[in-house]
Image (cartoon, helix red, strand yellow):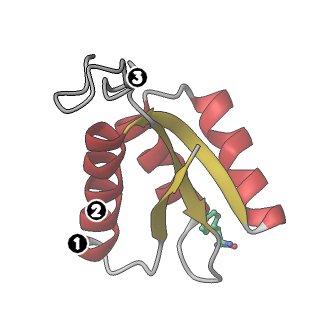
């Protein structure tokens, strides 16, 4: 770009950035049934039984686990889908976002 006042070239163009990615995290609690967590991971994150069970157990044992990494809008939609399903079934399951 060229500065209007001085004619000196200045860097005002935006750098082309990749769309930022967000981790969708699932948090452990003492009450949500393991089967419900597995169902959520299969339904909203496209996991098969084996992967869903592995991620559920990781959350159960370590307190938190990554369900997937997505662009912001998709990650937000998945958090809302999980939270809606948990609320409808009266489970305290918590799902949140974190910048990857
Ligand atoms: N800790 C829950 C139980 O023992 C299972 C669970 C796993 C809950 C992963 C939330 C996330 N019923």
- Identity of the residue drawn at 27% across and 28% down: 6
Mark 2 beta carbon near ligand 1 (under 8 Å): no
Judging depth in this view, the residue of 88 and 12 nearest the camera is: 12
- Where disc 2 sits, the SS reads helix
Tell me how far mark 3 sits from mark 2, CA to CA.
39 Å
Around disc 2, counting alpha carbons within 10 Å, would you say few (fewer than 14), some (14 to 19), or many (20 or more)?
Answer: some
Beta carbon at label 1 within 8 Å of ligand 1: no
Q: Quadrant of ligand 1?
A: bottom right
Q: Which mark is residue 85?
A: 2
* Image: 30 above or below 89: below
Tell me the quadrant of the picture where the N terminus can be found: top left
* Mark 3 Cα shell of 10 Å, populated few (<14), some (14-19), many (≥20): few
**Residue 21 placement (x, y as % from top left):** 47, 36
Q: Where does the C terminus fall, quadrant-wise?
A: top right
Does residue 9 sit above or below 20 in this rendering? above
Q: How many marks?
A: 3
- Residue 15 shows which numbered tag? 3
In percent of width and height, residue 70 lies at 43, 33
State if disc 1 and disc 2 touch (CB < 8 Å). yes
Inter-mark Cα distance, 2 to 1? 5 Å
Q: Earlier in the sequence, mark 3 or mark 2?
A: 3
């Amino acid at each position: 770009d060229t500065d209007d006042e001085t004619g000196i070239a200045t860097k005002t163009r935006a750098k082309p950035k990749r769309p930022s990615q967000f981790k969708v995290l699932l948090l452990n609690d003492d009450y949500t049934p393991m089967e419900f967590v597995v169902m959520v991971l299969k339904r909203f994150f496209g996991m098969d039984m084996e992967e869903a069970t592995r991620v559920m157990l990781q959350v159960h044992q370590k307190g938190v686990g990554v369900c997937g990494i997505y662009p912001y809008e998709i990650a937000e939609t998945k958090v809302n889908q999980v939270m809606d399903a948990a609320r409808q079934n009266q489970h305290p399951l918590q799902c949140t976002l974190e910048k990857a």
